[in-house]
Amino acid sequence: MFTIGDFASLGRVSVRMLRHYDSIGLLRPAAVDPHTGYRFYRAEQLRRLNRVIALKELGLTLGQVRVILDDAVEVAELRGMLRLRRSQLAAQLAADTARLTGVEARLRMIETEGRMTSQDVVLKELPAVRVAELTGVAPSYATPDVSPVIQPLYPELFRRLDAAGIVPAGPALAWYEPAGRGESVVVHAGVAVAVDPSAAPDLAVVELSAVAAAATIIHHGSMDEVEVSTQALAAWIEANGWRADGYARELYVEYCQDEPEKGVTELQLPVVRA
């Protein structure tokens, strides 16, 4: 048999951890000296210890691990536990990926501060346009709040247009306005159409008014990384004596749903002289 120190070394765990496993009934020593209280373990107990470590690394609690190792759980229940853990890990991965994208965008933003940007801002008129739209409400203007709201709207929008036999008359576009409560934002996902509103009963068909002056900039890549372009646009507006006067629009010159990194978007912000 092995002392607790030797067994801990073989199992690549701490003595403190083995004592904890003993106290909760997860891994009892093979023998305990009645006089000294020293714990002793057999080699075959390494198999149970290795299973404990493997299940812990999956994110299961020690209570769940004990139930599984003691065969007190049905196969269907074990499958459910692992599927739940898989869903939790997938959600965590998605959240971490979004945070990583945000950090990278912020780093690029910081690196461009104080230097001339390679992006050109163009002042232009925006013509009136008729659009078919779907809307949703996002908690705020922040990209991590807007993206999951707007992304599913476009596939549904195009599905309904196709069902109604309506062919888009121009590129897709989006615009945003306050929802009237807190920081919430109404997200509009639209596409230019040349039909009467009655032709699309499952969609709202609205008129976007012409804009006399809008500061515009072309953003290349995913909209999850739009902050750099947005900052460049804001800096130009301020430096050239303008101020925002209306709701921001996004014109998707090249809409790439499956490959967003290839997208080309014109950011449009109505402005007036400050």
Image: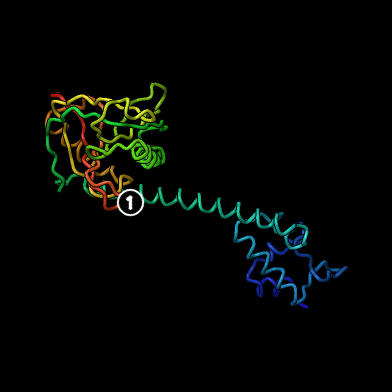
User: Residue drawn at (14%, 46%), measured in percent from left and top?
Assistant: 116
Q: Quadrant of the C terminus?
A: top left
Q: Residue at x 15, y 24 (%)?
A: 272
Residue 54 vertical placement versus 145 (above, below): below
Instruction: Determine whether 177 is above or below 98 in the image.
Output: above
What percent of the width, then of the height, locates residue 237? Answer: 16, 33
> Going 26% across and 30% down the picture, which residue do you hit?
195
Q: Of 163 and 234, which appears nearest the observer?
A: 163
Q: Position of residue 247 (x, y in %)?
A: 26, 28
Taking 132 as reference, is 127 left or right?
left
Residue 147 in sight from this viewpoint: no
Q: Position of residue 190 (x, y in %)?
A: 30, 34
Looking at numbered disc 1 in the image, what kind of residue is underneath it?
Answer: Glu
Q: Looking at this view, name the residue that lies furthest to the right.
A: 34
- Disc tally is 1
When the figure is inspected, residue 100 is found, relative to residue 44, above or below; the finding is: above
Q: Which residue is found at the position 79% from the left and 65% from the top? A: 28
Residue at image mark 1: 104
Q: Which quadrant would residue 138 be assigned to in this image?
A: top left
Give the side of residue 24 with respect to residue 231, left or right: right
User: Quarter of the image holding residue 20?
Assistant: bottom right
Name the foreground residue: 153 vs 144: 153
Which quadrant of the figure contains the N terminus?
A: bottom right
Residue 34, given in percent of the width and then of the height, sits at 88, 68
Quick one: SS at disc 1? helix
